[in-house]
Image (tube, rainbow, N blue to C red):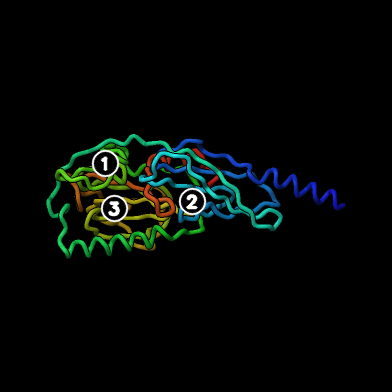
């Protein structure tokens, strides 16, 4: 009997590191999905990377890579319980350069060089947003593939370095869709509206929580048709596009967060749609 128990524990430990990684190489600002095999004796808990923890739900986890992560091999610490005993192992991913380009834009001077009042406002809005992003809703609201909020031309891709009025001010944190003022914007999937607000940089803004750390954002809107707390279904109209906030013209800025990390929304949607069975 002792021999059988020892053998079972040995077999369990051999399978502890079994996993499927969406890619062994990932660009900065992209998202990876790690899937673990079903095993009644092993309970996977979290992935730890830098100062962040990512909850493993139903034997899968989304791992966002920061835009500012330099190319190198990174180590993800997997925390799990094997026959009730807490253990950890390491998964490595090679981060490669995303090759993002540079854009030069001309906007109002007041949107680049901020007054004291505007600095105070943007700091408040930043905190409000991060209080949301740092909250992970355990429930998954998504049960079908994501759609895009608009079926129009993409005018600016995620990740391009942004030079406003001759001064480098970060990078483009989303994907821009062509949209004249007043174009209806569809929710990309089911979720709960967690922010509806006119903000300094993003103008009319709606953020939808899709559960398990996934947030999609709709910016520069001219009208809201939802309020905080509303449950929305895929295709529901969130409001109308506009030219509010820091813009050069009317459009929809569509962005995404996973575990509070800004990621490429189109790559995220492609990844989630490819793995829709696992995230259901």
> Pointer 2: residues within 10 angstroms few (<14), some, or many (20+)?
some
Residue sticking out furthest to the left: 109
Q: Which image quadrant is residue 228 in?
A: bottom left
Residue situated in front as seen by the camera: 73 or 139: 73
User: Dots 1 and 2: beta carbons under 8 Å?
Assistant: no
Secondary structure under badge 2?
Answer: strand
Q: Position of residue 215 (x, y in %)?
A: 40, 52
**Is residue 261 shown left or right of residue 166?**
right
Of callouts 1 and 2, the N-terminal one: 2
Residue 85: numbered disc? none
Q: Are marks 3 and 1 in contact (CB under 8 Å)?
A: no
- Residue at x-position 72% and y-position 47%: 12
For marks 3 and 1, give the CA distance: 29 Å
Residue 211 visible in the picture: no
* Eye-nearest disc, 3 or 1: 1
The residues tagged by marks 2 and 3 sit, at their Cα atoms, a distance apart of: 37 Å
**Marks 2 & 3, CB-CB < 8 Å contact:** no
Q: In the image, 61: left or right of 30?
A: right
- At x 34%, y 47%, the residue is 255
Label 1 to label 2, Cα distance in Å?
Answer: 25 Å
The kind of secondary structure element at disc 3 is strand
- Compare residues 227 and 120 and report the one nearer the observer: 120
Q: Which residue is mark 1?
A: 161
Foreground label between 1 and 2: 2
Reading the chain from its start, which is encountered first: label 3 or label 1? 1
- Identify which residue, 125 or 102, lies in the foreground: 102
Q: Is residue 256 visible?
A: yes
> Crowdedness of circle 1 by 10 Å Cα count: few (<14), some, many (20+)?
some
At x 24%, y 58%, the residue is 199
What is the number of the mark on residue 239?
Answer: 3
- Residue 101 lies, in percent from the top left, at 28, 35
- Numbered label attached to residue 49: 2
């Amino acid at each position: 009997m002792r021999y059988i128990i020892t053998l079972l524990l040995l077999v369990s430990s051999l399978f502890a590191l079994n996993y499927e990684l969406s890619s062994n190489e990932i660009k900065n600002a992209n998202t990876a999905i790690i899937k673990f095999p079903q095993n009644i004796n092993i309970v996977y808990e979290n992935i730890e990377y830098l100062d962040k923890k990512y909850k493993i739900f139903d034997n899968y986890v989304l791992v966002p890579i920061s835009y500012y992560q330099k190319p190198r091999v990174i180590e993800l610490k997997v925390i799990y319980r094997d026959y009730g005993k807490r253990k950890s192992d390491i998964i490595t991913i090679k981060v490669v350069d995303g090759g993002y380009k540079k854009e030069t834009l001309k906007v109002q001077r007041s949107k680049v060089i901020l007054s004291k009042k505007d600095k105070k406002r943007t700091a408040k809005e930043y905190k409000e947003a991060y209080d949301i992003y740092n909250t992970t809703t355990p429930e998954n609201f998504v049960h079908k593939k994501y759609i895009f909020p608009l079926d129009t031309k993409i005018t600016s891709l995620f990740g391009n370095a942004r030079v406003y009025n001759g001064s480098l001010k970060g990078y483009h944190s989303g994907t821009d869709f062509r949209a004249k003022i007043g174009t209806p914007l569809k929710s990309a999937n089911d979720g709960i509206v967690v922010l509806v607000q006119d903000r300094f940089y993003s103008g009319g803004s709606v953020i939808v929580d899709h559960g398990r750390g996934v947030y999609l954002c709709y910016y520069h809107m001219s009208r809201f048709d939802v309020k905080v707390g509303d449950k929305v279904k895929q295709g529901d109209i969130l409001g109308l596009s506009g030219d509010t906030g820091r813009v050069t013209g009317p459009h929809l800025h569509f962005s995404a967060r996973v575990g509070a990390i800004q990621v490429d929304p189109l790559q995220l949607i492609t990844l989630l749609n490819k793995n829709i069975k696992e995230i259901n």
